[in-house]
């Protein structure tokens, strides 16, 4: 079955450490997105990528980095520069001809 | 940028009641989408609307694309406990970056059995 997979589901990080969240899709979708979700804040766009080897900053890119070396994969690195990284992170993808996004099941990151 | 106002922020209703929520935009949208997110999961698409005035149903859910193209609403009839979750509206505008969706902040629905 096609889908979008985020891993791990839960992640704990010590302050000052970088951590990478995985997002893989086998839907042959062109565009991929990373969102951050905090209670009562809705979904805030971190980064997005329309094609391989190209990506753009979203509304809250500071302290995050991404890469898009393969169409299927769009990992997100939360760096030590991100001051408040504890949140629920959602990855999504979209095929070019569609307006709707398909979301992964999310990764909950907690800084300890 | 484009902003979506979604209301209400939260709702507590009795099982069997009907539910209504809406989204309004400061600018025109060409597409409206409604998503449901269950606790600890990603949002799942419920209904997509592509034309002003369009009314679309999906089981007990009905959504409409407002005539002004600046609003949309979602109704849930005869609510059941599994309707619990956060409902998000999303819209697609026009012009540069129109391939991206703008999301509302969500309506958190609680159903009391």
Image: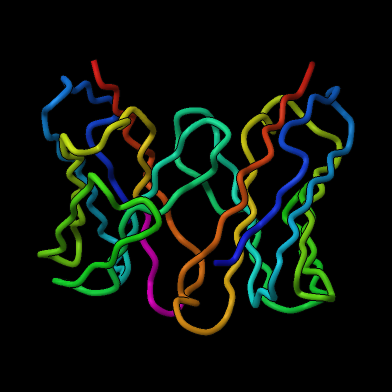
- Residue A102 percent location from the top left of the image: 43, 56
Residue A22 visible somewhere in the drawing: yes
In this view, the residue in front, B107 or A3, is B107
Q: Does A69 lie within the magenta span?
A: no
- The image shows residue B25, relative to residue B97, as above or below, that is above
- Residue A76 percent location from the top left of the image: 21, 47
The residue furthest right is: B17
Task: Please tell me in which quadrant of the rendered image residue B47 appears.
Answer: bottom right
Task: Tell me which residue sits at (69%, 39%) in the image.
Answer: B107
- The image shows residue B57, relative to residue A44, as above or below, that is below
In this view, the residue in front, B37 or B67, is B67
Task: Tell me which residue sits at (71%, 31%) in the image.
Answer: B109
- Residue A31 percent location from the top left of the image: 32, 68
Task: Tell me which residue sits at (82%, 75%) in the image.
Answer: B68
Find the magenta span and give its range. A92-97
Task: Please tell me in which quadrant of the rendered image residue B23 appears.
Answer: bottom right
- The image shows residue A57, relative to residue B69, as above or below, that is above
């Amino acid at each position: 079955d096609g889908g979008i997979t985020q891993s791990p589901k839960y992640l704990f990080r010590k302050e000052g450490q970088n951590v990478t969240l995985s997002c893989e899709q086998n839907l042959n979708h062109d565009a991929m997105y990373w969102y951050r979700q905090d209670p009562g804040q809705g979904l805030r766009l971190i980064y997005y990528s329309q094609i391989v080897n190209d990506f753009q900053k979203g509304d809250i890119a500071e302290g995050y980095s991404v890469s898009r070396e393969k169409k299927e994969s769009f990992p997100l690195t939360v760096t030590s520069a991100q001051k408040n990284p504890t949140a629920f992170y959602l990855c999504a993808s979209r095929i070019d001809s569609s307006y709707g996004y398909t979301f992964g099941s999310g990764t909950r990151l907690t800084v300890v | 940028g484009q902003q979506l106002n979604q209301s209400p922020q939260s709702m507590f209703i009795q099982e069997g009641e009907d539910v209504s929520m809406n989204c309004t935009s400061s600018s025109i949208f060409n597409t409206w989408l409604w998503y449901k997110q269950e606790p600890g999961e990603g949002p799942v698409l419920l209904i997509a609307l592509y034309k002003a005035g369009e009314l679309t149903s999906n089981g007990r859910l009905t959504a409409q694309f407002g005539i002004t193209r600046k609003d949309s609403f979602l109704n849930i009839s005869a609510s059941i406990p599994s309707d619990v979750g956060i409902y998000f509206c999303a819209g697609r505008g026009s012009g540069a970056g129109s391939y991206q969706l703008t999301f509302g902040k969500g309506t958190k629905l609680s159903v009391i059995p």
